[in-house]
Image: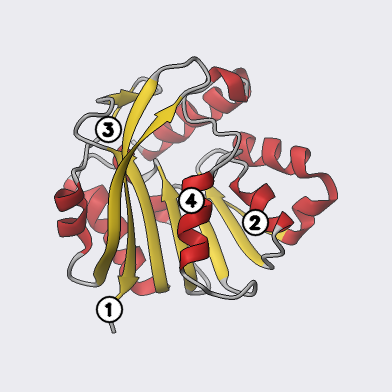
Amino acid sequence: MEIERKNHWETVYKTKRPDEVSWTQENPKTSLDFIHETHLDKKAKIIDIGGGDSKLVDYLLEEGYQNISVLDISANALERAKKRLGKNALKVNWIVSDITEFKPEVTYDIWHDRATFHFLTTSEQIKKYKEITKKWISNYMIIGTFSENGPKKCSGLDIKQYSEKAIENQFSDHFKKLKCFTEDHITPFETKQNFTFCAFEKRN
């Protein structure tokens, strides 16, 4: 299962340009706003889960953040991001891993996940994700998933839709919801995808 998933994403990032995939954002404003609202300093340890070749890392580097990690199942995706960043890529910790197999070495102040969690469709995958977040997040978790009004599939794969309440229920044992809202993402081919975005704070 994990190998199939990895092969799928390696092929996507090998064969499609950023303007040929639905998740591409020129400016990840919502994610940046959430990160700014944590009011943590520029030394905060931030990880972008399923970051692929997202431009979030570009903006964070430009703003002076110093401890950024980007995780993706696809080595091809991270290679594209590194190539784009040039010398700046040396300032980032790049991690090739399936999120359910991720074994962190540090705790993260900010865990950002736009459109990875909703690809976990089995209770076992979701359980593994929750165990990792419980143990390895020290402060904030930011998650964006397809909403109940969003797509049922992405990149040919089934996803799990989440309402605000459903995503809150998944994490309420160890995280307190700070805020949630739904938002339309306009894809590079001018279609709309409705997302549920939530910010959580780790419970003491």
x and y, in percent, of residue 159 in the image: 27, 32
Badge 2 element: helix
Q: Is residue 159 left or right of residue 13?
A: left
Q: Amino acid at mark 3?
A: Ile
Q: Amino acid at mark 4?
A: Ser
Question: Going from the N terminus, do you reach mark 3 or mark 4 first?
Answer: 4
Question: Going from the N terminus, do you reach mark 2 or mark 1 first?
Answer: 2
Answer yes or no: is residue 103 visible.
no
Q: Nearer the viewer, residue 179 or 147?
A: 179
- In the image, what residue occupies the spot 27% across and 29% down? 150
The image shows residue 163, relative to residue 88, as above or below, that is: above
- In the image, what residue occupies the spot 50% across and 15% down? 189
Q: CA distance from mark 2 to mark 4?
A: 10 Å
Residue identified by numbered label 2: 60
- In the image, what residue occupies the spot 24% across and 51% down? 126
Q: Amino acid at mark 1?
A: Arg
Q: CA distance from mark 3 to mark 1?
A: 28 Å
Foreground tag (3 vs 4) = 4
x and y, in percent, of residue 157 in the image: 33, 25
Q: Quadrant of the C terminus?
A: bottom left
Residue 159: mark: 3
Residue identified by numbered label 1: 203
Query: Mark 2 near mark 1, Cβ–Cβ under 8 Å?
Result: no
Tell me the crowding category of disc 2: few under 14, some 14 to 19, or many 20 or more residues within 10 angstroms, Cα based: some
Q: CA distance from mark 3 to mark 4?
A: 21 Å
Question: Going from the N terminus, do you reach mark 3 or mark 1 first?
Answer: 3
x and y, in percent, of residue 71 in the image: 54, 51
Badge 4 element: helix
Badge 1 element: loop
Q: Amino acid at mark 2?
A: Leu
